[in-house]
């Protein structure tokens, strides 16, 4: 038994990357304050499922290209796993695993009945046309069908994905099961069952947390100078919200 444990500890698993090790290091720091058994603690150090996919796509010039896709489901103890889909050239299994871990903690801390997941496709979305992105998304969704569902794993927008991406995913999944399943994704257009304020919610949440932090520190947010990293769906909206609060 000792030999097996020592051998296992020396093996680097597929998702073992610096970002995943960071997520686990944070977890280890929090463990002394958590009332969990060693068995539960050990289980939560690992994802429940990590899927790697090959996604063949026909480009507009008739070339066929195969993209790498990933989906990691960390914990389904509290309910279906939940997490974003990102399109980026740097997407890896380890990155998705780390982000899935963090999604589990976020859902648990807010007492939401979900676990953490994250997925993505390694591609440069800026070099793909809208029709190519649609074909990529629909094929990715088709390949994920055995492991996703409203009671299993629910997708959401993330880096370089948006309401349109979620609409394609919802439509593809619904066609496969024979009826509309709007709950397979969040962040979809309002016209197909999406939520009002969903697009702004993450950036606005950043500002709400910042305002609460300033309040605890005795600072006035309107008097602060803020630095925002990135100017996408989250950073751009956060910057606008901060400006509305009087911050610079």
Image (tube, rainbow, N blue to C red):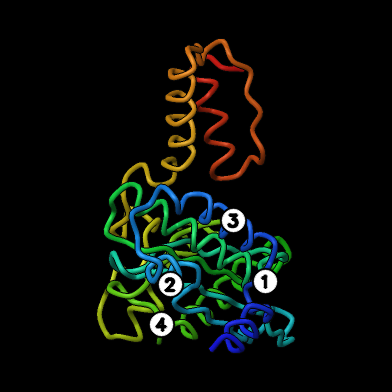
Q: Earlier in the sequence, mark 2 or mark 1?
A: 2
For disc 2, the neighbor class at 10 Å (few under 14, some 14 to 19, many from 20) is few
Distance (Cα) linking label 3 and label 2: 15 Å
Disc 1 designates what residue?
122
| Mark-to-mark CA distance, 2 and 1 | 28 Å
What residue would you read off at disc 2? Answer: 43
Q: Whole-percent x and y of residue 149?
A: 33, 76
**Of the residues under marks 3 and 2, which one precedes in the sequence?**
3
Give yes or no for contact between labels 4 and 2 (Cβ–Cβ under 8 Å): no
Does 58 appear above or below 109? below
Label 3: few (<14), some or many (≥20) within 10 Å? few
Above/below status of 7 relative to 47: below
Q: Residue at x 43, y 17 (%)?
A: 215
Q: CA distance from mark 4 to mark 3?
A: 28 Å
Q: Can you tell which mark lies on residue 147?
A: 4
Q: In the picture shown, does residue 202 fall above or below 122?
A: above
> Is residue 108 toward the left or the right of residue 199 in the image?
left
| Mark in the foreground, 4 or 2 | 2
Indicate which label's residue lies in the foreground, 3 or 1: 3
Does the CB distance between marks 4 and 3 fall below 8 Å? Answer: no
Q: Quadrant of residue 38?
A: bottom left
Q: Which residue is mark 3?
A: 25
Q: Secondary structure at mark 1?
A: strand
Q: State how far apart marks 3 and 1 are (Cα).
A: 26 Å
Q: Residue at x 53, y 50 (%)?
A: 29
Taking the image as shown, residue 9 lies to the left or right of residue 42, namely right
SS state under label 4: helix
């Amino acid at each position: 038994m000792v030999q097996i444990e020592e051998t296992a500890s020396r093996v680097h698993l597929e998702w073992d990357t610096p970002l995943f090790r960071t997520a686990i290091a944070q977890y280890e720091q929090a463990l002394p304050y958590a009332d969990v058994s060693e068995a539960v603690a050990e289980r939560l150090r690992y994802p429940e499922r990590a899927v790697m996919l090959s996604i063949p796509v026909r480009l507009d010039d008739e070339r066929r290209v195969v993209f790498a896709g990933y989906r990691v489901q960390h914990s389904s103890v509290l309910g279906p796993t939940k997490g974003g889909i990102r399109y980026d050239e740097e997407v890896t299994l380890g990155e998705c695993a780390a982000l899935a871990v963090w999604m589990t903690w976020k859902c648990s801390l807010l007492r939401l009945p979900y676990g953490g997941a994250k997925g993505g496709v390694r591609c440069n979305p800026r070099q793909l046309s809208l029709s190519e992105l649609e074909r990529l998304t629909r094929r990715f969704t088709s390949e994920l069908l055995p492991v996703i569902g409203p009671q299993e794993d629910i997708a959401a927008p993330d880096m370089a994905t948006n309401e349109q991406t979620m609409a394609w995913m919802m439509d593809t999944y619904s066609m496969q099961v024979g009826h509309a399943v709007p709950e397979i994704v969040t962040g979809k257009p309002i016209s197909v069952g999406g939520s009002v304020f969903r697009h702004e919610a993450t950036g606005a949440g950043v500002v709400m947390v910042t305002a609460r932090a300033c309040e605890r520190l005795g600072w006035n947010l309107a008097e602060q100078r803020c630095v925002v990293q990135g100017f996408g769906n989250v950073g751009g909206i956060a910057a606008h919200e901060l400006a509305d609060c009087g911050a610079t």
